[in-house]
Amino acid sequence: MNVNVDQTHKEVRIVQLRQFERSRFFTGQVLTADDLQREQDYHRDKARLHNRFLHGWGVVAGLMVSIDQGVVVVAPGLALDCAGNELILPTEERVSLSGLTGRQYVTIRYVELPTAQISSPSGEVEVSRVKEAVVLRVLSTNPQAGHSALPSGGPGCGQSHELCLASISQRSSRWRVTPVKVKRKQSGQTP
C-alpha cells in the first residue's frame, strides 16, 4: 500500500489498497504449507492494516529512554511502526554509548528471527518457527527525518523501518535525552 501526502492540505490519500482473500476450508481438503502460510499472512496483514489506520505509528506505552553511566537504557514497552508491526520490548534493554559524541538517535526496529529448524521430507533444513522481536540501535541520523509531512499518529509511509524513540546529545561529559513527541490519534479520529 502506498500513501501520498498532499502538502497543501496536509491530508493523507490512499493511493493503493489491495483487497483481501481468505481461505475457505472444507472437510477432506488437502492443505499445503502454502495454504497455511496464506492463512497466517491474511491475519497478519489485516492486523497491520488495523494498526496503521486505526492507531497510527509511534510509541503506544513505555519505551522511555534514559542514560545511566554512558549506557542508553530503554524501558519495556510497545510501539507501532509505519507498516503496522507491533514493536514489543518485554524487558529493559541497554546500549553502550562508548565512542559516540554529538547528537545521536535511539531507535527501535521490528525484526523476525528464525528460532527453530527441522528437516523437511526432502532432507533440506527449513525454518519452522520465527520470533517477532526488536532491535535497538543508536544512530547518527534520524530515521524519521522524511516523516515531517506525514501526520504523527497517522498511517505513516507503510514501510517497516526504524522508529526514533529519543534524541540524545552530549554536553561536555553529560548526555541529555530529548524524547520524540508523537501525537497519538484519539479513538474515532480519522488520519
Image (cartoon, rainbow, N blue to C red):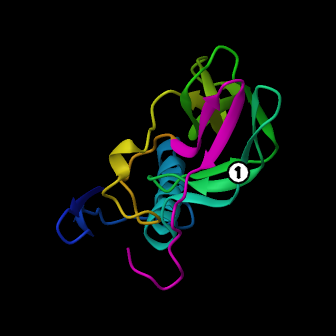
Q: Tell me the SS state at disc 1.
A: loop
Crowding at label 1, few (<14), some or many (≥20) Cα neighbours within 10 Å? Answer: many
* Residue 47 place in picture, x, y as percent: 53, 63
| In-front residue for pair 154/178 | 178
Q: Nearer the viewer, residue 161 or 147?
A: 147
Most distant residue in the bottom direction: 188
Considering the image in quadrants, where does the N terminus appear?
Answer: bottom left
Q: Position of residue 155 (x, y in %)?
A: 40, 63
Q: Which residues are magenta?
A: 163-191
Magenta-drawn stretch contains 9: no
The residue positioned farthest toward the top in the image shown: 99
**92 w.r.t. 113: above or below:** below
- Counting from the top left corner in percent of width and height, residue 56 is at 48, 65
Residue tagged by mark 1? Answer: 63
Residue 105 in which image quadrant: top right
Quadrant in the picture for residue 130: top right
- Residue drawn at x 78%, y 36% is 93
Residue drawn where x is 61% and y is 17% of the image? 123
**Quick check: can you spot residue 152?**
yes
Q: Quadrant of residue 11?
A: bottom left
Q: Percent from the top left, x then y, of residue 76?
A: 77, 49
Using residue 14 as the reference point, say whether residue 156 is left or right of it: right
Which sits in the foreground, 167 or 11? 167
Q: How many marks?
A: 1
Res 131 seen here = no
Identified by mark 1, the residue type is Leu
The answer to if 175 sits in the magenta stretch is yes
The C terminus - image quarter: bottom left
Q: Residue at x 46, y 41 (%)?
A: 161
Residue at image x 20%, y 72%? 9
